[in-house]
Image (cartoon, rainbow, N blue to C red):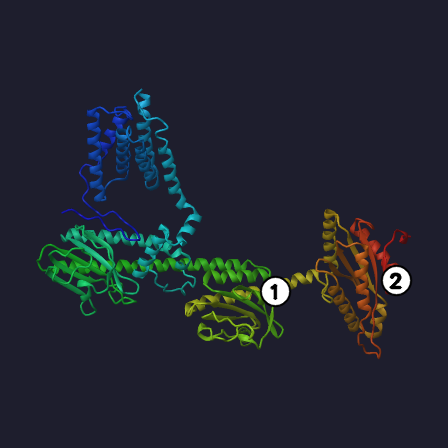
Amino acid sequence: MKKTPLPKNPVTSQPQMGDKSRWPWLGSLPALAGAALIAAGLVPPHATTAPPVLAVAGILTIAGLRYLRQRWLARTVPPLEEALLAVVMTWLIFLVGGWTNPALILLPGMALAHIAFRQSWRVLAVVGVTIAAMAFGPLVLGQAAPSLAATRAVPLLLAVGLFLRLLPTTRRYRQETAEKPGTLAATLSRGRHELVRELGITAKPASLPETIHTLDARNDGVNFSRQTLGRLNTSFELQLEMIRQSLALTTVAVLWPSPNGQELRLRWLASTREDIDRGPYPAGRGITGAISDDHPEIELQLVNPAHPDIPYYQNQPEIGAVLVLRLPTEAEGGPSEDHRHGLLCVDRESSEPWSDRERTILRLAAQKLGLEVETSRLLLSLDRDRTAIHQLSLALRELNSGVTVAAVLAATIKAVKSQVPADLVAVSLREGDGHRLAIAEGKNVVDLIDKRFPLAHGLVGQAIRIGTILPAGGRYPKPAPIFSPERTFSEFGSLLIFPLRTEENEPLGALVVAGNASGLFTKGRQDILELITTQVAIKIELAQAHERLGRLATTDGLTELANHRAFQHGFEVMLQRARRNRTPLCLLMGDLDLFKQINDAHGHPFGDLVLRETARIIKETVRNVDLAARYGGEEFAVVLENCDATGGHQLAERIRERIGSLALESDSEEPVQPTISIGLAVFPEDGKAKDLLIERADQALYRAKHRGRNRTVIWLASDED
C-alpha cells in the first residue's frame, strides 16, 4: 500500500520514512537530457521547433514532472534532483512556448528564486552552472538562443530569492517578525509555544527558583525550546514509523491534549491513508472518550461506522482493529503533574484480536514515548537552570561594577528588571528620620523621585523601620499607601518591599518591586529578589563609603567647601575653559576680619561656628557652576565663571552684606557680628595665569584690609608697589 506523508504541524515537518527508489539517479536523467538538448541549441527559442525535437522535449518534460511529483509525494526526492528537474523542465517550457508567450521566462526565474531561497548553497551553485550552460551554450555553438533582454527576469528573480534567504538571518528581522502578529515567524512561534506547553516541557526548574522573567515572555522560550522540540519530533516520527512497519499497521498516531484539556490535537502520525483530518478534535470524541484512569487501554475489533469513530479519519470505512493506550508522562509511569496524557492510537485492516505480544510491544512503545517527553522536560529544565544562573550572574556582575551610589542604583534597576516582569522598580534611601526616593522606573512615579517621606508614612517607611519584607504574601493590600498617603497605586496587584540593611543591621533604605498582575511573587521569585537585595545593600554601603572618601579628599571637613587642593585643580580647569571660550572669569579672595580676636575671646568652637556660617552663606550665594573653597584658615576663595568685574563686585557685596548681618549668640552678653574683606581680580584684564590672578586678588584683599576692613576692593594696576 502507498504511504501518506507525515502531516505538517506548526512546529516542524520531517520527511516520513518510506521506500527508497532503487535508482536514485533516475530522476536526474530527464533533467540532464533536457539540459544537454538545450545547451546544444536543439530547442531554438521564439520559433517553431522541429516536431521531433518538440516531441523529445515534451516527453522529457512530462517524464521529469511526473517523476518529480511521485517522489515529492513520497517525500524522498533529493534536493539536488528536485532543483535540477524544476529548473530544466521550466526552461524547456519557456523555450518551446516562448515564441507565443515570452512571459514564460518567469517560470525558470521563479524556480531559480525558489531554489535560492530554500536549498543549500551547493545546490544553488550546481543549478546556477546548469542554467548558465543552457543560456550561453547555444551562443557558444552558434545556434539560436534567447536574447539577454528576454531572460532579464532570471537574475532579477534570483536576487529576490537571495534577498529572502538572507533577510531572516538579520537580528532586526528576527526581533520584529517574532513579535508582529500575523507573520510567518509569529505563527510558527505560536505553534511552538502550543506544543511546548502541551507537552509540559516548560516545566519549572527542579533545583533553582524559577526564573521570574521567563524566557517565553521575551520570546526566547521558543528559540530556547526549538532544539529540544526538534529532537523530540524526530524521535517520535521514527518510533511511530518503526511501530507501523513492524506490526503491519495502517496508522500509528499520537494525540495530545491542549493546555486547557478541551481539545485533542494530532501531533505525530505514520499512516498509509490519505484521508487524514488534521483536527483539532473535541476532547472525548469517539473512541478516545473511553480512556480513563480505570481504563488506560481500549481495544475494538471490526470497527465500522456504527462504532465510535476514530477522530483523525475523514471517512470511517471498516477497520479491522483499533487499540488506544494512554501515554505515561513520568519515567516511573505515574500520573502527570497536570493530569493530561497523550494517547497512542493504532489501527489495522486485520480484524484479528490484538495478541499478547502486540499489546506488550505497544505498551512498551507508549512507555518509551512518555519517557521521551519526560527526558525533554528534564533537559529543558537543566538548560533553563543554566540560563537563569547565567542571567543572574550577568546582572550581579553589572551591579558589582558600580562604584558610585548612582551607578549602583541604576544597576539595581537593570538587575531586577532582567529577572522580573515588574511594572515598578524603585530604591528609597534612608535620610535621618525619613527616606528619599533615589531612583524609580515605572508609571506615575517620576514626580516622586528625590522626594523625602517620613518613616511613619507608607509601607516603604514601615519596612525600613522594622526591617521586614512587606506586605505578606506579595499581595498589594489596596489602597494601602506605598510611599505616602497622598499617592496610591490602584493598578498594582502584586507588591514586595525589601528592606536594605548593612552588615551591622542598620537600615539603608528599601527596594520596591511591584507588578500589575496578581500572584506575581512566588516563593522562588522572592528567593531571587532577596539574593539581589542582599547584594544591593552591600554595594550601596560600599558606594557610600567610597563617595565619603572622595569627598574627604576634595572637601574641607569643617565647612564642606572645596579644600585648597580641589580649589587649585578646579581653578585651573575653569581658567582653561575661559581661555578656550574667550570668556571672562572672576576670582574673589575673602578673609574674615579680626578672626583671631574672635577665637581668643570666645574659643575655637565658636570660631568654627563662624567659619561654618560664613561657608554656608557663600555656598548659598554663588551659582552651581561656580567654585567656592576654603583657601586656608579663615580665608575663602570663589571662582565665578563667565563673570566680569561688575558682576563679581555685585556678588562679593552680597556675600559681604549677608555675613555682616549675622548675629551669632556667644557666651558674652552681646551677639558676635563677624565681617569679611574681599579682594577681586578678573581674567584676562588683570592676568592670564592662575598664580598671577591669585596674587593680584590677594593684593586687592590687602588693600581692603588696609582701608578699614569689611569692604570689597577690585585690583587695579596702580595697586602694585
Q: Residue lying farthest left?
A: 352
Amino acid type assigned to the residue bearing label 2 in the image: Lys
Give whichever of 164, 617 is nearer the camera.
Answer: 164
Q: Residue at x 56, y 61 (%)?
A: 408
The answer to whether 243 appears left or right of 11 in the picture is: left
Q: Which residue is mark 2?
A: 705
Which class describes the residues within 10 Å of circle 2: few (<14), some (14-19), or many (20+)? Answer: many
Q: Residue at x 65, y 64 (%)?
A: 548
The answer to whether 543 appears left or right of 35 in the picture is: right
Give whichever of 79, 406 is nearer the camera.
Answer: 79
Q: Residue at x 17, y 52 (%)?
A: 244
Give whichever of 546, 643 is nearer the camera.
Answer: 643
- N-terminal of the pair, mark 2 or mark 1, is 1
Q: Which residue is mark 1?
A: 544
- Determine the CA span between mark 2 and mark 1: 42 Å
Q: Quadrant of residue 68?
A: top left
Amino acid type assigned to the residue bearing label 1 in the image: Gln
Residue 112 against residue 392 in the figure, above or below: above
Give the SS element for disc 1.
Answer: helix
Image coordinates for residue 707, horizontal then vertical, percent: 91, 62
Residue 235 against residue 139 in the figure, above or below: below
Which of label 2 and label 1 is nearer to you?
2
Q: Residue lying farthest top?
A: 142
Give the SS element for disc 2.
Answer: helix
- Disc marking residue 253: none
The answer to whether 637 appears left or right of 79 in the picture is: right
- The reply to whether residue 206 is visible in this rendering is yes
Image coordinates for residue 345, horizontal then vertical, percent: 19, 59
CB-based contact (under 8 Å), mark 2 and mark 1: no
Image coordinates for residue 125, horizontal then vertical, percent: 34, 34
